[in-house]
Amino acid sequence: MAVNLVPPKPEDLLPVKGLTLGVAEAGVRKANRKDVLIMRLAEGASVAGVFTQNRFCAAPVIVCKENLARARPVRALLVNTGNANAGTGDDGLVRARLTCSELAAALACDSSQILPFSTGVIMEPLPADRIVAALPRALADCREDNWAHAAEAIMTTDTVPKACSRRIVLEGKPVTVTGMAKGAGMIHPDMATMLGYIATDAAVTPAALQHMLKLAAARSFNRITVDGDTSTNDSFMLIATGAARTPLITNETQPDYAALAAAVTEVAVWLAQAIIRDGEGATKFITVQVDGGKNEAECSQVAYAIAHSPLVKTAFFASDPNLGRLLCAIGYAGIADLDVGRVRLHLGDVQVVSGGGLDPAYREEDGQRVMQQSEITVRVELGRGSARTTVWTCDLSHDYVSINADYRS
Amino acid sequence: MAVNLVPPKPEDLLPVKGLTLGVAEAGVRKANRKDVLIMRLAEGASVAGVFTQNRFCAAPVIVCKENLARARPVRALLVNTGNANAGTGDDGLVRARLTCSELAAALACDSSQILPFSTGVIMEPLPADRIVAALPRALADCREDNWAHAAEAIMTTDTVPKACSRRIVLEGKPVTVTGMAKGAGMIHPDMATMLGYIATDAAVTPAALQHMLKLAAARSFNRITVDGDTSTNDSFMLIATGAARTPLITNETQPDYAALAAAVTEVAVWLAQAIIRDGEGATKFITVQVDGGKNEAECSQVAYAIAHSPLVKTAFFASDPNLGRLLCAIGYAGIADLDVGRVRLHLGDVQVVSGGGLDPAYREEDGQRVMQQSEITVRVELGRGSARTTVWTCDLSHDYVSINADYRS
């Protein structure tokens, strides 16, 4: 049960001119489910990407980076679920490239103009033949108003498809930003086990688009954690088709850049939070806000110490204001000269800690009331400076264990 | 259900001359259980200690360090369970000191000669009055052959008391080393939520004893993790009563030092492993061995990335050779220039990974066979150098969530 997250209505997902999407059943892992997605780009589109920092990055990530580095116009993105093609060595690269070259043949382009993505089980050979066999059906399905099916096709342990749209006006012309993402476990900054795709019909140069993508990632997908595991396959792509025929955005000083970046970031934050709301076994959506640090890095250390603590996360699951666990996590976050006497801790609107211990005005029933809520904000004031950061996470429940103990079976 | 860990037979726990132990029911948190322990030291004993690195360290830890710093002979250690006296601010210090001064009065010594220890719930006021009221009964119970009751009295979520003894011969005289520990969750290096006490009747100077303690801690309690949470209260104490009347050990170059340090380390490793065997919800005992690193630090990074991964731990719980999760953890451990093509991974006696992917000879049924075992060794060869390290951990089960969701209720 995702936390306050409902599937998008198909009519709320606005088509992005210059981009069509098609899905098909390839039987990669399970029968009777759409597990292959093609996103076709019209000529003139720009594509930017950021990828997992995991050293065992998956074959499709390697191929994606290689193909992007060639700087030829991208014609299509090819996504499969059910198999991550990760930890598969040289054979994995061969298989990833094979799916690209087959799609390239169908589209009469070079295989370097195809970007592959895979998500699913690690260390099993990608059934490239089945994916290739499904390509004609996915191509035949390609249309602009197919985001809802696409968002479903990329799901793995997700329980709710994740997609949303925003519309803005640039230079008097309507511009659409639509995005979708998948991911529910193995979620950690830099990056999550997640695939994220945001597209706009605005016109943006590749360099400006890459800048916009990094900005959006830093404020969204890189601020979330389910379980601290950083996947082998994470990829977040930003596509600008230019089909809205708005003036070309070339750098970050332009007002149009700011307006579009804001909309892209808003979509990215919505998707990132949706991933947490649908976190494996999640019953609570937790915002961890750390203020008053000397710098953002130490705020992040504290925020992630809290967000990663299994003890904190099980306390949230139990709706138990066992607040010492929060204090404990702050204490081991690694700020060597932290003055615990200056730390303040709020749970929702309730002040919990001051003077190195329980705030005199704190009452257990107040903490209990906040813990019962499905959306909880933990706010830590470090009392050391003016830096701040926010991280989103979820609780740790029985279902997390069940989902991950049973994933392959 | 602890993993292959049975309670020690009382007769296997050898008394340490010069040290008596007494327990009593104080009703700190629960009725009808021994929750206060006094360890009395004969004159001439040396005491060494290492403590949590958590910035929110508990009041008794602060008082312990203060009292040890005064370098007056320690006359007694006072331990309570049920309440950690952590996150309790100045009031916590007052209460910790009160229990020391009351015990000091009974023993006609200075309160700085008492070392206090607390473990249990965080951020609740220590019921010092109840502990003080129980002191006469605990003192009356003090005797040398009381280790079994003492090991029981310090338990919190432990399911099995943890204690063992070794006997060695120094200069022709028998010397005893007996130790006990508690801890089952919030276990992480530097240090675990754990209290550990090892005593010997050998004669050792405080400086040599401190050196020996750090050595033993580095090889035992600082090599384990249940959940990555570092407690506010961790304390590991080494006591040398000198009552065996062996020659005084003054520095680490002496053969006697080496012999005694080996026995102390052996007891410490046994206790540290016992904590993991009794890890909250543990069903598997996992040894993570990382070889071939450039230095021990990077071996540790990889070992802890594996040992902390909830996905790896749930796969062990499920007996599922979902080995990609191991590979993934190695990949995100933070070795930026790791050549994944050189990494080898063994699960028990089965080679799993070579050449950046699944070893050609690997068969799923072999992995399955190892995963069914209750004691599993994961061995990673990084192929970068000759450094190595070992870490012990357990799996992540439904019971871990249950235990920590229900702890306070």
Image (tube, coloured by chain):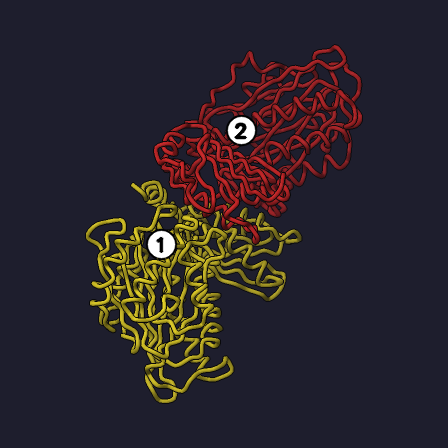
Chain colours: A yellow, B red
Mark 1 packing: few (<14 Cα in 10 Å), some, or many (20+)? many
The subunit letter for the residue under badge 1 reads: A
Between marks 1 and 2 in the image, the one whose residue lies nearer the viewer: 1
The residue tagged with tag 1: helix, strand or loop? helix
Quarter assignment of residue B143: top right
The residue tagged with tag 2: helix, strand or loop? helix
Quarter assignment of residue B396: top left
Tell me the number on the disc at residue A235. none
Is the C-beta separation of discs 1 and 2 under 8 Å?
no
| Amino acid tagged 2 | Gln
Quarter assignment of residue A114: bottom left
| Amino acid tagged 1 | Arg
Q: Is residue B55 above or below residue A11?
A: above
* Quadrant, the N terminus of chain B: top left
Tell me the number on the disc at residue A95. 1
* Quadrant, the C terminus of chain B: top left
Q: Give the percent coordinates (x, y) of residue B102.
A: 66, 30
Q: Is residue B321 above or below residue B239?
A: below
- Residue A324 visible somewhere in the drawing: no
> Is A173 or A17 nearer to us in this picture?
A17
- Residue B354 visible somewhere in the drawing: yes
> Is B77 or A38 nearer to us in this picture?
A38
Circle 2 is placed at which residue position?
B273
Q: Give the percent coordinates (x, y) of residue A254.
A: 48, 84
Residue at point 64%, 53% (across, down) = A338
Mark 2 packing: few (<14 Cα in 10 Å), some, or many (20+)? many
> Is A271 or B146 nearer to us in this picture?
A271
